[in-house]
Amino acid sequence: MSLHLFMLQVPMIQQPSIKDTPSPKLQQQVFAYFDQPETLQFAYDLLEEPIPLYPEHAGLLYNWQYCAAALQGKPDLALTIIQKALDAGFWWGEDYFRNDADLATLQTLPEFNRLDRTKSTIR
């Protein structure tokens, strides 16, 4: 399973590293839950509260959260989270959106393609 950790926050271009995560323990728990389809909801639940607590890591946390939603087969929720992240100024890049295996269930949806086009207004 692929979980990409790179995300750009407009206007500054930066690629977060593992050491920049809000808590190594949180990351370990989230990734452990990503390993099993039946525990993906636990990963999502763990990520609901940290976003306001760690605003400097919001992009990374949004990424993990929408990946968990997409992998659970909840495309509407995943798209809502992506839009929320876009509205907050986070952009991942076209290549990431088109090639991330975690987003495979979203990549053919018209709503997903509409989100891709919003990047021109954010950059």
Image (cartoon, helix red, strand yellow):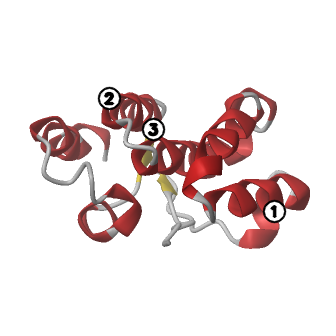
Residue for point 40% across, 46% down: 70
* Residue holding disc 1: 28
Q: Is residue 63 left or right of residue 92?
A: right
Residue situated in front as seen by the camera: 29 or 52:
29
Residue situated in front as seen by the camera: 85 or 121:
85
Q: Position of residue 94 (x, y in %)?
A: 25, 62
Instruction: Estimate the spatial distance between the alpha carbons at disc 2 and disc 1, rounded to whole Å.
Output: 26 Å
Residue type marked 3: Gly
Q: Is 3 placed above or below 23 here?
A: below
Q: Residue furthest front?
A: 38
Residue for point 50% across, 59% down: 7
Mark nearer the viewer, 2 or 3: 2
Q: Quadrant of residue 98?
A: bottom left
Q: Residue furthest left?
A: 110
Q: Residues within 10 Å of mark 2 (few under 14, many from 20)?
A: some
Residue situated in front as seen by the camera: 54 or 101:
101
Q: Residues within 10 Å of mark 3 (few under 14, many from 20)?
A: some
Q: Is residue 12 left or right of residue 122?
A: right
Q: Earlier in the sequence, mark 1 or mark 3?
A: 1
Residue type marked 2: Asp
Res 88 label: none
* Residue holding disc 3: 89
Q: Is 71 placed above or below 55 here?
A: below
Res 76 label: 2
Q: How many tags in the picture?
A: 3
Q: Is 92 placed above or below 56 here?
A: below
Q: Earlier in the sequence, mark 2 or mark 3?
A: 2
The secondary element bearing badge 2 is classed as helix
Contact check, label 1 and label 3, Cβ < 8 Å: no
